[in-house]
């Protein structure tokens, strides 16, 4: 045990007491009794099959719920609790590497949940095997051989658990890095985000009763295997992201490349569901929207921005790149993606977008939507910087969220309700109105708003200028 | 501002000829609207104990955290035994032990397990881990508490455990931020003995504290910070090989006494008041013997020669007075 990952060993000491090791099987046993009681109630026609189906459902659903509601909370709390208990500096001061810390914390902090999940997985697998052997139930329900269903369930649930636990820890660590109050709020937000994402994932792939297929980049694929592979791929990304976040916490120097690469990967993954030139547009939009995530989670840090500006003034591009915010790098990559998508739109056959989008004038779409969209996101990010540089920095996100609700929700609704459609491009990207309907091209409005936002940021930056700090303190 | 290693500035030990334990170069650290460290530079020689003093908000903790590579400075660098701490923080952490002023412990773990965890986090495994833990338990007098949960320890016991965790991997350099806060007089005395013991084992220590009397017991150097600036860094009188302040008393007025003293190699800052001359001179009995023989030989009516100890509190007061005198 002494050669074990030290973080994992510490959690084993803390989490796996003999009492807890006994308690978990007892609780699962009690739940099995409950399922058994339901299965053999009067009026149930096939008690044995129902019992095994019930155990299968208990095992797989219990696994997912345990991960979502208990594991996610433990995982999000892992580092937050260390910071609250003032032990995090001791961890950061150790010579243990970022990768060892990452997997030690990821597995260790949730080791008791993993123990329960393992028991539930065994229950689900054994029940499924018995169900197939005695009643042929698996074959009837899933239209697939037993081993395929077992493999999909085991791999899918394990990948799902890693995805949820790594994502929630990553979100919580990134949010708490701002070292603000409301750490428990960070935990709750991280957990809610991941639960919502998981519910969306489950609803997308819930149709398992038929031999479902999926078209991805024109390939006819088994929907279940595709879901398992996708969850596994995103789980791997979550672990890589967590490792990168751990490197930041351990003061190891990082280059801001992983997030844009992830954004491009997600864009390419999403684009597979759309045919023709629409796929390029979808990829560009996903990359563009991905910029909001690091901007909101990390929030602009004046000291980091000051370092970036100083490095740029000294033409030290290596240092500048190190201190460049992820959202800014992502936004540059998004510009390239938007340019590629626009070129694709303009060169599309018949100057029309493909199947995924109704027949739209390509130029209008490129100029009126994509570029306007890019400029609106630029404005939003600048407004977030503006809010973060304000004196109520801690409330920056809430303030910004309110502005977004007004700009994208309230005002367009008022304009639509009063019939002022021609004014819509001032507030939202429009795509279903021909360019000739506008006296001013739609991109002009967001361009002016970007300029205004830049002026605001520059005005607020004065408070943080290095010249002020260099003034004698005494 | 004299630096250790500069002529007349600091210790003249064997270790002084090797690479500095810590070299801080033009360190600047910013908070969003405040510059916490202004271009701070200094060198810490191996096997020295440096007292880091200054008023609240002087930048002591920020400086220690930058040295421990827990914070990234805006500019400048920290070299730990010649290696940039921020280029490779994990490597520098093998050489460093750091005790924060507001430290935490794993309350549910026993003292032994806390130490085993700290040792393992520094890469010690198996027998190395066991030996390191046993050694530090002995050093910090924790044997009777070994199986007690950390959450059940008293303030002083917790402090000892935290120090044990910081030094379990036998770092070359130990940074301690207010290690004596909350300790009773006996525990403080034991802490002084412990720090001197660590120095004798070859460790370099930087200790931040408000309790100057206690720092005086074990510090060889003082580093004074004020408003993010380094205002003084010098050896404390009586430290090995350091310059000392001597007071020469004469039996009758001697008009050229100052000139005679200034002509002696090694003597600086001569001030004559009445029948007493105060000056800085190399430490050591042989120098004082040679000086007396020379003065008596020259016919100076020497009545006495004594070392005037300029301690940490004197230095701090002197620096504070200097600051007040500035415009």
Image (cartoon, coloured by chain):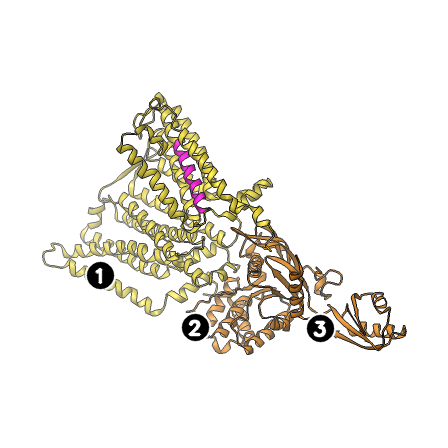
Chain colours: A yellow, B orange
Where is mark 3, residue-wise?
B309
Could you say whether the residue bearing mark 3 is in a helix, strand or loop? loop
- In this view, which residue lies farthest toward the right? B298
Question: Left or right: where does residue A408 sit relative to residue B174?
Answer: left
Image quadrant in which the C terminus of chain B is located: bottom right
Q: Observer-nearest residue: A409 or A290?
A: A409
Where is mark 1, residue-wise?
A32
Gap in angstroms between the C-alphas marked 1 and 2: 37 Å
Gap in angstroms between the C-alphas marked 2 and 3: 45 Å
Q: Quadrant of residue A187?
A: bottom left
Q: Quadrant of residue B110?
A: bottom left
Q: Is residue B48 visible?
A: no
Pointer 3 local density, CA inside 10 Å: few below 14, some 14–19, many at least 20: some
Chain letter, disc 2 residue:
B
Chain letter, disc 3 residue:
B
Q: Nearer the viewer, mark 1 or mark 2?
A: 2
Q: Are marks 1 and 2 in contact (CB under 8 Å)?
A: no
Q: How many marks?
A: 3
Q: Residue at x 71, y 65 (%)?
A: B11
Q: Observer-nearest residue: B173 or B156?
A: B156
Image spot of residue A126 (x, y percent):
26, 56
Which numbered tag is attached to residue B149?
A: 2
Q: Is residue A113 visible?
A: yes
- As displayed, is residue A92 above or below residue A194? below
Question: Left or right: where does residue A164 sit relative to residue A35?
Answer: right
Q: Which residues are magenta?
A: A372-389
Q: Nearer the viewer, mark 3 or mark 1?
A: 3
- As displayed, is residue B38 above or below residue B151? above
Q: Residue at x 19, y 46 (%)?
A: A140
Q: Main secondary structure of the magenta part?
A: helix
């Amino acid at each position: 045990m002494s050669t074990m990952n030290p973080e994992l060993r510490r959690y084993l000491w803390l989490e796996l007491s003999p009492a807890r090791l006994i308690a978990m099987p007892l609780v699962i046993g009690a739940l099995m009794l409950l399922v058994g009681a339901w299965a053999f109630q009067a009026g149930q026609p096939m008690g044995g099959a129902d019992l095994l189906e019930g155990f299968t459902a208990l095992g797989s659903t219990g696994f997912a719920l345990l991960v979502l509601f208990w594991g996610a909370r433990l995982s999000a709390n892992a580092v937050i609790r260390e910071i609250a208990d003032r032990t995090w500096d001791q961890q950061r001061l150790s010579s243990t590497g970022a990768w060892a810390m990452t997997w030690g914390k990821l597995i260790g902090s949730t080791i008791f949940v993993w123990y329960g999940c393992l028991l539930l997985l065994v229950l689900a697998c054994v029940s499924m095997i018995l169900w197939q052997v005695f009643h042929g139930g698996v074959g009837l329900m899933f239209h697939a051989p037993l081993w395929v269903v077992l493999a999909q369930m085991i791999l899918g649930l394990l990948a799902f658990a890693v995805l949820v636990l790594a994502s929630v820890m990553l979100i919580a660590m990134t949010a708490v890095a701002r070292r603000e109050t409301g750490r428990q709020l960070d935990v709750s937000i991280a957990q809610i985000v991941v639960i919502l994402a998981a519910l969306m994932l489950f609803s997308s792939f819930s149709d398992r009763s038929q031999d479902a297929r999926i078209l991805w980049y024109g390939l006819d694929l088994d929907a279940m295997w595709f879901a398992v592979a996708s969850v596994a791929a995103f789980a791997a990304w979550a672990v890589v992201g967590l490792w990168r976040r751990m490197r930041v916490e351990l003061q190891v120097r990082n280059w801001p490349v992983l997030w844009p690469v992830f954004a491009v990967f997600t864009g390419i993954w999403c684009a597979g569901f759309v045919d023709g030139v629409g796929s390029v547009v979808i990829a560009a939009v996903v990359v563009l929207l991905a910029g909001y995530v690091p901007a909101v989670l990390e929030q602009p840090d004046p000291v980091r921005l000051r370092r970036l500006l100083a490095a740029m003034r000294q033409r030290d591009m290596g240092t500048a790149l190190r201190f460049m915010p992820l959202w800014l790098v992502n936004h540059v990559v998004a510009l390239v993606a938007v340019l590629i998508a626009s070129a694709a739109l303009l060169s599309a056959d018949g100057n029309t977008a493909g199947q995924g989008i109704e027949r739209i004038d390509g130029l209008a779409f490129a100029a009126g939507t994509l570029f306007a969209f890019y400029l609106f996101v630029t404005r939003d990010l600048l407004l977030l910087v503006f809010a973060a540089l304000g004196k109520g920095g801690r409330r920056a996100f809430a303030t910004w969220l309110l502005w977004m609700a007004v700009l994208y929700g309230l005002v367009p609704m008022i304009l639509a309700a009063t019939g002022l459609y021609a004014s819509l491009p001032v507030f939202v990207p429009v795509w279903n109105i021909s360019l000739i309907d506008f006296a001013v091209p739609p991109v002009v409005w967001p361009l002016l708003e970007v300029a205004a936002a830049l002026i605001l940021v520059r005005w607020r930056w004065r408070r943080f200028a290095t010249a002020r700090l260099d003034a004698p303190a005494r | 501002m004299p630096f250790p290693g500069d002529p007349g500035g600091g210790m003249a030990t064997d270790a002084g000829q090797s690479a500095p334990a810590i070299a801080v170069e033009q360190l600047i650290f910013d908070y969003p609207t405040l510059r916490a460290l202004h271009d701070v530079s200094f060198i810490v020689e191996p096997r020295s104990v440096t007292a880091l003093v200054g008023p609240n908000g002087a930048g002591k903790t920020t400086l220690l955290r930058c040295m421990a590579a827990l914070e990234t400075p805006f500019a400048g660098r920290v070299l730990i035994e010649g290696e940039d701490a921020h280029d490779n923080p994990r490597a520098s952490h093998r050489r460093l032990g750091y005790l924060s002023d507001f430290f935490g412990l794993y309350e549910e773990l026993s003292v032994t397990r806390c130490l085993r965890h700290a040792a393992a986090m520094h890469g010690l495994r198996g027998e190395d881990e066991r030996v390191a833990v046993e050694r530090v338990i002995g050093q910090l007098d924790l044997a009777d508490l070994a199986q007690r949960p950390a959450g059940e320890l008293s303030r002083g016991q917790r402090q000892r455990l935290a120090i044990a965790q910081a030094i379990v991997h036998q770092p070359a350099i130990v940074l301690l931020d207010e290690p004596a806060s909350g300790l009773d007089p006996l525990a403080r005395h034991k802490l002084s003995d412990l720090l001197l013991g660590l120095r004798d084992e070859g460790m370099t220590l930087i200790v931040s504290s408000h309790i100057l009397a206690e720092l005086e017991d074990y510090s060889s150097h003082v580093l004074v910070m004020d408003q993010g600036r380094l205002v003084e860094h010098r050896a404390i009188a009586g430290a090995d090989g350091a310059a000392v302040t001597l007071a020469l008393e004469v039996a009758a007025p001697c008009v050229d006494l100052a000139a005679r003293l200034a002509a002696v190699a090694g003597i600086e800052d001569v001030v004559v008041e009445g029948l007493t001359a105060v000056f800085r001179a190399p430490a050591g009995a042989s120098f004082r013997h040679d000086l007396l023989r020379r003065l008596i030989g020259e016919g100076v009516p020497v009545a006495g020669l004594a070392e005037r100890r300029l301690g940490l509190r004197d230095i701090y007061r002197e620096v504070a007075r200097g600051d007040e005198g500035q415009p």
